[in-house]
Image (spheres, rainbow, N blue to C red):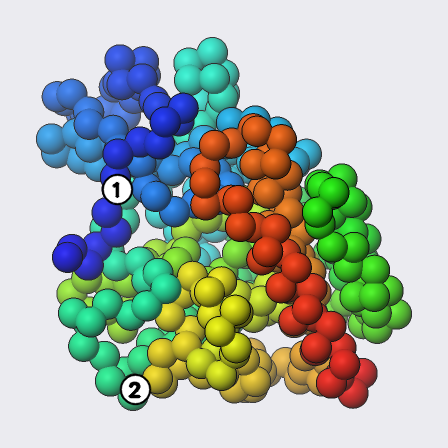
């Protein structure tokens, strides 16, 4: 098994025409020669990601999904700009080459960036890595350190101060995800009423120092150095990035962080090896983040519950497309069960919370 991330055959209905892509790229990227081979990365429930291989160079192309798109999501130009400008203060962004706004070429906007070749962790640590618990803990702490580093970037110096409005961020997220959830409702979806009322009631003030918020920071969006897998060399998926409250971003990441002691149905949702021996628990994750960032975190339950609700919103938006036949991807059929489980997890946090 190759440890570096592998692309596969393109899913039916999501094909790219090489005869259209090739001349466009050759006109915009100097020195390209030969014919490209195009394949698809199997992950990605939102934007579609393709590998374009020329004899001497490899690129990644990102385009929005087919079918219904949430307003403001899937803005290719925005993601392209973030990669180009954030790179100055946060060197883990891949280099972006070209952004195509001509939708007639492949039916949507797209952009092309360098391929950062490395290891992307999925549900389990590959046995080839042969990590012991100590090495896994060190990797976990590197992962958190990189998030802290992102949150400490001077976004004004990167020319990204207009990327979002930090004032009122917490309130906008709670209200906005409530609205998005309602728009994506299907007859079989849970209501989340109790959780939404609790989030509104317990809402803290915005953290006084705003930061770049990745909004999707997890191990399968991080690239590890194949020669030194403890080292992070890239961070991917900047489509949801904005400026806001770093603790809300921490909540987003914790929502994906399924630990070893979580029950079996929750383990089925796991998409990263956060359960492996040596990985920190959610509580330890928060404590380590607080220590490294210098931020005191007293209301961890709020941020974690928000993260779970937001994840349910994303899951439901994707399930809505499947429910209405706008995507054929069979992976999304069980997303309704995931939504219901996320609601149960949130209710359990609220039940035990001292907030």
Measured from the top left, where is residue 86 in percent x and y?
A: 47, 50
Residue 329 is situated, as x and y percent measured from the top left of the image, at 45, 37
Q: Is residue 209 visible?
A: no
Q: Is residue 197 above or below residue 74?
A: below
Under circle 2, the secondary element is helix
Residue 39 found in image quarter: top left
Q: Residue at x 58, y 42 (%)?
A: 318
The reply to whether the C-beta atoms of the residues labelled 2 and 1 are less than 8 Å apart is no
Question: For numbered disc 1, what is the local secondary structure?
Answer: loop
Q: Residue at the location (83% across, 60% down)?
A: 193
| Inter-mark Cα distance, 2 to 1 | 30 Å
Question: Which label was assigned to residue 7?
Answer: 1
Q: Position of residue 9 (x, y in %)?
A: 26, 34
Give the residue at the far front of this rendering.
188
Q: Is residue 332 visible?
A: yes
In primary-sequence order, the first of circles 2 and 1 is: 1
145 w.r.t. 171: above or below = below
Which residue carries the number 2 mark?
133
Question: Which of the image's four quarters has the C terminus?
Answer: bottom right
Task: State the image quarter where residue 311 is shown.
Answer: bottom right
Q: Residue at left 51%, top 44%? A: 332
Q: Residues within 10 Å of mark 1 (few under 14, many from 20)?
A: some
Q: Which mark is residue 165?
A: none
Q: Is residue 32 above or below residue 85?
A: above
Residue 252 in the image: state x and y as whole percent: 60, 63
Q: Residue at x 37, y 64 (%)?
A: 123
Please state, as top left, top right, bottom left or bottom right, where the N terminus lies in the image.
bottom left
In the picture provided, is 303 more to the left or to the right than 294?
Answer: right
> Seen in the image, is 340 located left or right of residue 87?
right
Which residue occupies the foreground of this view, 290 or 44? 44
Q: Residues within 10 Å of mark 2 (few under 14, many from 20)?
A: few
């Amino acid at each position: 098994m190759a440890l570096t991330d592998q692309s596969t055959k393109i899913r039916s209905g999501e094909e790219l025409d090489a005869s259209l892509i090739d001349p466009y790229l050759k006109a915009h990227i100097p020195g390209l020669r030969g014919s490209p081979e195009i394949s698809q990365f199997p992950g990605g429930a939102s934007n579609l990601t393709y590998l374009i291989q020329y004899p001497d160079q490899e690129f990644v192309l990102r385009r929005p999904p087919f079918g219904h798109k949430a307003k403001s999501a899937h803005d290719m130009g925005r993601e392209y700009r973030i990669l180009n400008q954030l790179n100055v203060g946060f060197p883990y962004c891949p280099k972006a080459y070209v952004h195509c706004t001509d939708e007639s070429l492949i039916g949507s906007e797209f952009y092309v960036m360098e391929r950062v070749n490395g290891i992307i962790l999925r549900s389990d640590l590959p046995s080839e890595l042969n990590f012991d618990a100590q090495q896994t803990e060190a990797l976990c702490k590197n992962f958190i350190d990189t998030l802290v580093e992102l949150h400490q970037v001077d976004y004004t110096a990167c020319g990204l101060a207009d990327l979002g409005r930090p004032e009122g961020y917490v309130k906008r997220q709670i209200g906005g995800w409530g609205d998005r959830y309602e728009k994506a409702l299907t007859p079989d979806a849970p209501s989340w009423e109790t959780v939404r009322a609790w989030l509104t009631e317990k809402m803290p003030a915005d953290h006084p120092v705003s930061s770049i918020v990745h909004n999707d920071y997890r191990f399968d969006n991080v690239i590890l150095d194949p020669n030194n897998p403890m080292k992070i060399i890239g961070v991917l998926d900047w489509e949801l990035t904005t400026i806001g409250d770093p603790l809300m971003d921490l909540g987003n990441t914790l929502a994906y962080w399924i630990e070893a002691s979580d029950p079996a149905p929750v383990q089925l949702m796991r998409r990263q090896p956060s359960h492996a021996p040596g990985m920190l628990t959610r509580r330890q994750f928060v404590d380590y983040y607080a220590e490294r960032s210098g931020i005191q975190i007293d209301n961890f339950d709020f941020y974690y519950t928000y993260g779970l609700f937001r994840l349910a919103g994303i899951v439901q938006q994707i399930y809505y497309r499947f429910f209405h036949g706008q995507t054929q991807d069979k992976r999304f059929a069980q997303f309704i069960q995931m939504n219901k489980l996320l609601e149960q997890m949130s209710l359990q946090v609220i039940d035990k919370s001292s907030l």
